[in-house]
Image (cartoon, rainbow, N blue to C red):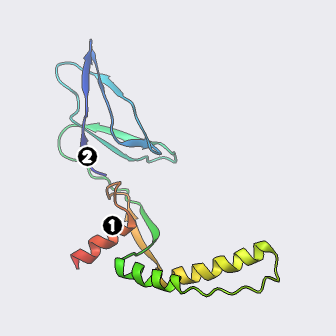
Amino acid sequence: MKTRSVRKRTRHANWSVANVNQATRGANCLDRMIYEYISEPCYSDIKVVQSAVTSDHRAVIAFTGSIKVTYNKVNTKRIFRKQSPDTHAVFLSQLSQLQYQSDYTDDTQTEFDHFYEYLHALLDSFYPERTITITSREPSYMTPALKALLRCFAS
């Protein structure tokens, strides 16, 4: 998780309000965080981390000084299909020559299941499933496809 600066501070008598601009529960963000404002702000940065206890909420850490390191990294294996313009062209030419035969003896659901299996096998032959690991320390915009592209350019 990257550290982000406080987006907005407004002074209200002896208190100040700071907005947190990172998701703290699902896709929802904490609206504001209230802290005592004496002569200067009591913190300069906010970091949102995974909670140490079992909860669907995330912990908000407000601090001053050096950037805080998150030690509880979580690895998640994600499955994706690598795509390229060349693979698309070959797949579409194969799809245009599709010769699917059905005996129409089974019921409708069974026929759809057979057709789905045929298309899924075709999809697996051109776009095989690949597994890539995404960690909790990576930015929220890091997708499996983007990480695979970055690995290709790095090597």
Which residue, given by chain and number where applicable, does mark 2 sit on?
Answer: 3
Image coords of residue 28 (percent x, y): 44, 40
- Judged from this view, the residue extending furthest toward the top is 13
Q: Nearer the viewer, residue 31 or 72?
A: 31
- Judged from this view, the residue extending furthest toward the front is 96
Q: Say the numbered circle drawn on residue 146.
A: 1
Secondary-structure class at tag 1: helix
Q: Which residue shows up at 77% across the image and 86% down it?
A: 103
Q: Say the numbered circle drawn on residue 84.
A: none
Q: Which residue shows up at 33% across the image and 68% down it?
A: 147
In the displayed structure, 48 sits above or below 91; it is above
- What residue type is disc 1 on? Leu
Tell which tag, 1 or 2, sits nearer the viewer: 1
Secondary-structure class at tag 2: loop
Q: Which of the 4 image quadrants contains residue 150?
A: bottom left
- What residue type is disc 2 on? Thr
Precedes in sequence: disc 1 or disc 2: 2
Mark 2 residue crowding within 10 angstroms, few (<14) / some (14–19) / many (20+): some
